[in-house]
Amino acid sequence: MPVNFNNAEFILSAALPEQFIRDGRKQIAFAGRSNVGKSSVINRLVNRKNLAHVGASPGKTTQINYFLIDGRIYLVDLPGYGYAKVSKSERDRWGRLMENYFSSSGLLDLGVLIVDARHKPTVDDMTMCDFFRSNDCPMLIVANKVDKLKKSETEHNLELIRETLDLDETEILIPFSAEKGDGKENLLGQIKAFCG
Ligand code: GDP
């Protein structure tokens, strides 16, 4: 039976490594700059308005949120990064949590890196991309907010994202709109194919 993404529940928020879930189920981690639309993408995938909290005060939550899908896989919502007004102590906390998460072997099965389709990926986006790569973690890139681009701009921007993140032709970049639903079936298909 394919995984039913309409059957999703919030499990817990982890602020400390001891709280990371290690129960053998596959974990698909979503990463992205604050405000890129990470919560909206997750909500779109599970057909819910407010499972992941949209518009949560940017950078205020240094927590990893776990959502269980169909009792079978976890969507892991990593805390957003790159919000300018965050204090140094908060940024340090973010860094420690990420290092702990990425260095805890066997937690991460697939990374979904969400970038803004309108802009060149930021240095932080590149760092996050390298986090996934250096862990030999398979990765999907999602270019969100394509609804804000003219058709003629989309192709150019996708190419810029590919170049900036140094994606090779086997790496998958999915144009997406959490707002309108573009790319949803593509992303779900990739995740389901991965989960087997
Ligand atoms: P997060 O901080 O990455 O979790 O971002 P949110 O999901 O809270 O979204 C930030 C803002 O971008 C909200 O106002 C969303 O309504 C908006 N947003 C998210 N995805 C899209 C999209 O695909 N298109 C448009 N136009 N707006 C979006």
Image (spheres, rainbow, N blue to C red):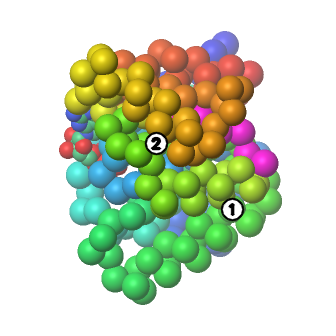
The answer to whether residue 137 is magenta is yes
Q: Are marks 1 and 2 in contact (CB under 8 Å)?
A: no
Relative image position of residue 132 (x, y in whole percent): 67, 51
Name the residue carrying label 2: 114
- Looking at the rendered structure, the kind of residue marked 2 is Ile
Left or right of 194? Residue 84 is left
Membership of 183 in magenta stretch: no
The residue identified by callout 1 is 102
> Observer-nearest residue: 126 or 52?
126
At horizontal 46% and vertical 65% (from top left) the residue drawn is 63
The quadrant of the rendering that contains the C terminus is top right
Residue density around tag 2, few if under 14, some if 14–19, many if 20 or more, within 10 Å: many
Label 2 residue near ligand 1, CB within 8 Å: yes
The image's mark for residue 57 is none
Could you tell me if residue 60 is visible in this image?
A: yes
Which amino acid, mark 1?
Phe
Image coordinates of residue 34 in percent, x first then y, are: 35, 56
Q: Residue at x 63, y 43 (%)?
A: 166
Q: Is residue 176 above or below residue 39?
A: above
**Going by the image, does 151 lie left or right of 174?**
left
Q: Which residues are magenta?
A: 136-141
